[in-house]
Amino acid sequence: MRNVLTIARKEIGSYFASPIAYLLMALFGLLTGFVFYSAVAYFVMEGMRSQAMGQGQAMSVNDFVIGPVFSNMSVFGLFLIPLISMRLFAEEKRSGTIELLLTSPLSDWEIVLGKWLGAVTMYLCIIFIAACDIALLFVWGKPDWRPVLAGFLGLILQGACVLAIGTFISTLTKNQIIAGAATFAVCLLLFVLSWVSSYNEAPWAQVVAYCSIMTHFEPFSKGIIDTKDLVFYLSVIFLGLFLTTRSLESLRWRA
Amino acid sequence: MIKVEGLTKRYARHVAVNNISFEVGKGEIVGFLGKNGAGKTTTMRVLTCFLPPTAGKATVAGFDVLEQSFDVKRNIGYLPETPPLYPEMEVAEYLTFVSKLKNIPSADIKKRVDEVCERTSIADRKSTIIGKLSKGYRQRVGIAQAIIHNPPVLILDEPTSGLDPEQQQQARQLIASLSGDHTIILSTHILSEVEQSCSNVIIINNGEIVAVDSVANLHKRGRSTEMVAVEVAGAPADAVRSKLEEVAGVARVVTRDSKDGTVAFEVEGLENYFLRPELARAIVHSGWNLVELKAVGESLEEIFLELTRSEQKAVEPAAAEGALTK
């Protein structure tokens, strides 16, 4: 475990030693800030209108602001995650530092887990920026906090899951751009798979749609934590990390 | 300490190392000599458990590289061809990271880092970012990284490449100072380096070992007869030449060049003759000025080229035959 933390700490260090951490945080903050502003503005406008029409029906901040913000954040996440994960192994392979890791008394899974944890921590730092927006709602309003937690849990799980896939893809190449582009393509694919269910009811379509990350994120954004979704995310994380370990192992004999 | 038996490493298309065997005893410094692409790095990578062998067996410090890779890794320090450095880290930070990877107890890390910095003379750059270091410093950080956990076996892949002559000298001294408690294999294609720092040499060519010997033996292996360079002033070349040819035991005299009134010759002796005193006497007795008289030993360079060349010659006819039968 000590080795895992050593590697994770080194990864976080190298994100923050380069501009990439700050750049990603700034971009994500800007994007979610804009979405947040739009959602709040829309909410305020709707609120005024319903008051003017004399409808006393209470509007929920959770439904009008927090839900949409989470949905958007999950989409932005898909764009940002390849930028986090692409360097994990590709950079080490290119610069030759992988030789240090593979000739030190570490097991492959310690390396993989450490790198993935480092990337997840980086991702947490990024979505923390967005959490600041939502915190504002608690200052001036009284949203239900439980769906907010569920939303963040979903966001973290989704990120962790895509990062696991990205880590795997990063072991396949020396080229960061290729790793990033391939991860991005897989992310988008996992995103659009859910569309199948909207025009096809066949069992295979259901299966395909089930594989989509979006299908499983939606409940979280509405504040629902379903074991089915938890199991999906955790098993994809496991699969991703398992494949990464295998791929790292194969570096030795494929050479 | 290191034992390699019938080691073969085959890549998809070609055989990098073919059935090599050698042994390195405790405390020895062995130079691994070969041209680029001869299989040096591959062999080292197998020994460090970075690559598994295709066939054969290799043990380091008594542990098998395949079966007990963890124990092997604990017992080796490895400097790859390009030092495995993270450019964004500071030197001390990097060495601390490596210490943790090598399972040095936390309490000892600071002390070890200071020690290796002192030893590799990088103490003045401890808080410099590695990316800003010169090549010489980087190489030394690479060596520091390899010795930080005080491993019994050190494997250094071209430890002096890219260093200027002074730094090379320092690196060699450093390596020499490490011998005794460490067993060291270092690869190089600089022959003088082997002569200076190694006790034994393994010459590898096209994935096969062509010679395993001590440096002294290799020198002897070169030639059994004596070769002497003679320079004489104030005499006609022909006269000197015929005089030299008269000396007992001289097989051949070759005129090298003549300028500014001095003439130079190369004298080859017959076997079991000690030529130099006789030559000196002959020249001085004739009333000429003896400017220079020295034995020309065959350099390691020539031996190396000869060994690797003859290997190729031996291979070529076979290859040609193969082509014919096809």
Image (tube, coloured by chain):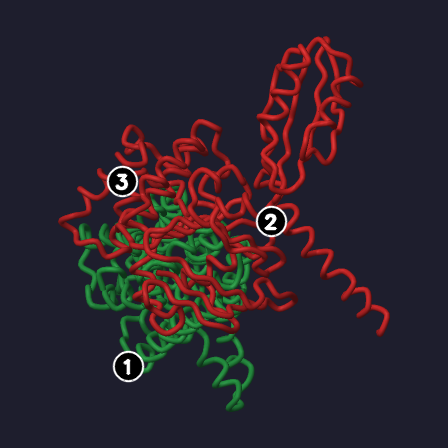
Quarter of the image that includes the N terminus of chain A: bottom left
- Which residue is under mark 1? A227
3D distance between C-alphas at marks 2 and 1 = 58 Å
| Residue at the right extreme of this rendering | B324
In the image, B208 versus A179, the foreground residue is B208
Q: Amino acid at mark 3?
A: Val
Measuring 61% from the left and 31% from the top, which residue is drawn there? B275
Label 3 resides on the chain identified as: B
Q: In this rendering, would B168 be left or right of B10?
A: left
Q: Amino acid at mark 2?
A: Asn
Q: Are marks 1 and 3 on the same chain?
A: no
3D distance between C-alphas at marks 2 and 3 = 30 Å
Q: Quadrant of residue B321?
A: bottom right
Label 2 resides on the chain identified as: B
| Residue at the left extreme of this rendering | B107
Residue A145: in sight, yes or no? yes
Give the number of the disc on residue A154.
none
- Which residue is under mark 3? B116
Question: What tint does the image give chain B?
Answer: red
Question: What tint does the image give chain A?
Answer: green
Q: Are marks 2 and 3 on the same chain?
A: yes
Q: Amino acid at mark 1?
A: Thr
Query: In the rendered image of this protein, does residue A228 appear above or below residue B291?
Result: below
Secondary structure under tag 1 reads helix
Q: In this rendering, would A239 be left or right of B244?
A: left
Q: Quadrant of residue B127?
A: top left
* For marks 2 and 3 on the same chain, the one whose residue lies earlier in the sequence: 2
- Which residue is under mark 2? B36
Label 1 resides on the chain identified as: A
Secondary structure under tag 3 reads helix
Measuring 51% from the left and 73% from the top, which residue is drawn there? B55
